Image: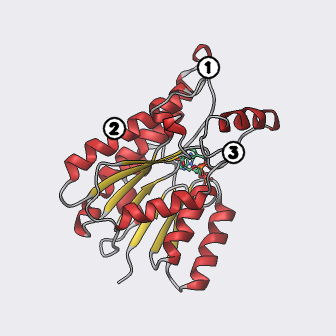
Amino acid sequence: MAKVALITGAAQRIGREIAMCFHAQGWNLVLHFQTSEGQANELCEQLNSVRTNSTRLVRGDLSDPACTEQAADHWFSSDQRLDLLINNASVFSAQPLSSIDLAHWESTINTNLRGPLFLCQALAPKLEESNGSIINIADVYAQQPLQHYSVYSISKAGLVMMTRALALELAPNIRVNAISPGAILHPSNSQPEESAWVDSLLKKVPLNRTGNASDIAITALYLATNSYTTGQVIAVDGGRLIS
Ligand SMILES: NC(=O)c1ccc[n+]([C@@H]2O[C@H](COP(=O)([O-])OP(=O)(O)OC[C@H]3O[C@@H](n4cnc5c(N)ncnc54)[C@H](OP(=O)(O)O)[C@@H]3O)[C@@H](O)[C@H]2O)c1
């Protein structure tokens, strides 16, 4: 029987690449999206045309506690299996300390940290049944702060600690790991004037280039299939954290 992965924020960019990589390896998918309905439908149809009934969609705002608390009941029937949860959805926006307000704090923390925690809580019983695993997509900025992105860095640092804490708590039946990408794709909301800033960040990358979304996807596949790895955070960052 095919294993099943739920990937949040899977309609586009890195989430989409992870979805395509797992599907090509024979996994069935539950693809989560919030606003990117057209892209989610297109990806779902594309994957189902390769393998009938291999992929389905679920929708929800992960910053809304009702969404995460009810995820197990709303997104799965009691006989539907789940082997892997990939917490990929995230928001990323700049806010210098002087202009951080409650709305920015709540949107960032609730989407990037609170949502994944309560999704893990809701889906842990299902993952337990399958001896499954969880992969959290963090960021190198969990370890090294990015100027003007303190709330984002705090949210990802929390996600890294959540990975380690839940790995301990959910062992031996559920493994929990994380990936910390470096510079992979320019932010989807970046302005043309910010591309020079993004390019300047690359000067701090020893491999001297951005990575590919597929580098994140194959790392996720490794973590999903290596049954003796838990509580680990793998940087996929071109060497950014050693520079
Ligand atoms: N891009 C990079 O180079 C890079 C670097 C380091 C770390 N990362 C991490 O890698 C992961 C993927 O990166 P990315 O650049 O592909 O992400 P992204 O495009 O910024 O966001 C992924 C998806 O998150 C979903 N999302 C945002 N807020 C949501 C909410 N409140 N509820 C539900 N879904 C929500 C969106 O879904 P809809 O479009 O359906 O609304 C969006 O498509 C993220 O965790 C990111 O922090 C990326």
Task: Point out the residue furthest to the top here.
Answer: 98
Question: Residue at 57% of width from left, 16% of height from top?
Answer: 97
Instruction: Please name the residue shown 63% across and 53% down the image.
Output: 35
Q: How many marks?
A: 3
Indicate the secondary structure of the residue bearing disc 3.
loop
> To which residue does mark 2 refer?
161
**Horizontal side of residue 43 vs 155, given as left or right:** right
**Callout 3: CB less than 8 Å from ligand 1:** yes
Mark 1: amino acid: Pro
49 or 150, nearer to the observer? 150
Counting residues from the N terminus, which is met first, the one under dot 3 or under dot 2?
Answer: 2
- Say the numbered circle drawn on residue 186: 3
Q: Is residue 86 visible?
A: yes
Say if mark 1 contacts mark 2, CB within 8 Å: no
Pick the quarter of the image with the N terminus: bottom left
Would you identify the image quadrant in which residue 229 lies? Answer: bottom left
**Kind of residue indicated by mark 3:** His
Q: CA distance from mark 3 to mark 2?
A: 26 Å
Amino acid type indicated by mark 2? Met
Other residues around mark 3 within 10 Å, as few (<14) / some (14–19) / many (≥20): few
Task: Please name whichever residue, 162 or 228, is drawn nearer the observer in this view of the structure.
Answer: 228
What is the spatial separation of the Cα atoms under label 1 and label 3, in whole angstroms?
20 Å
In the rendered structure, the answer to whether residue 87 lies left or right of residue 126 reads: right
Give coordinates of residue 108: x percent, y percent: 52, 35
Residue at label 1? 96
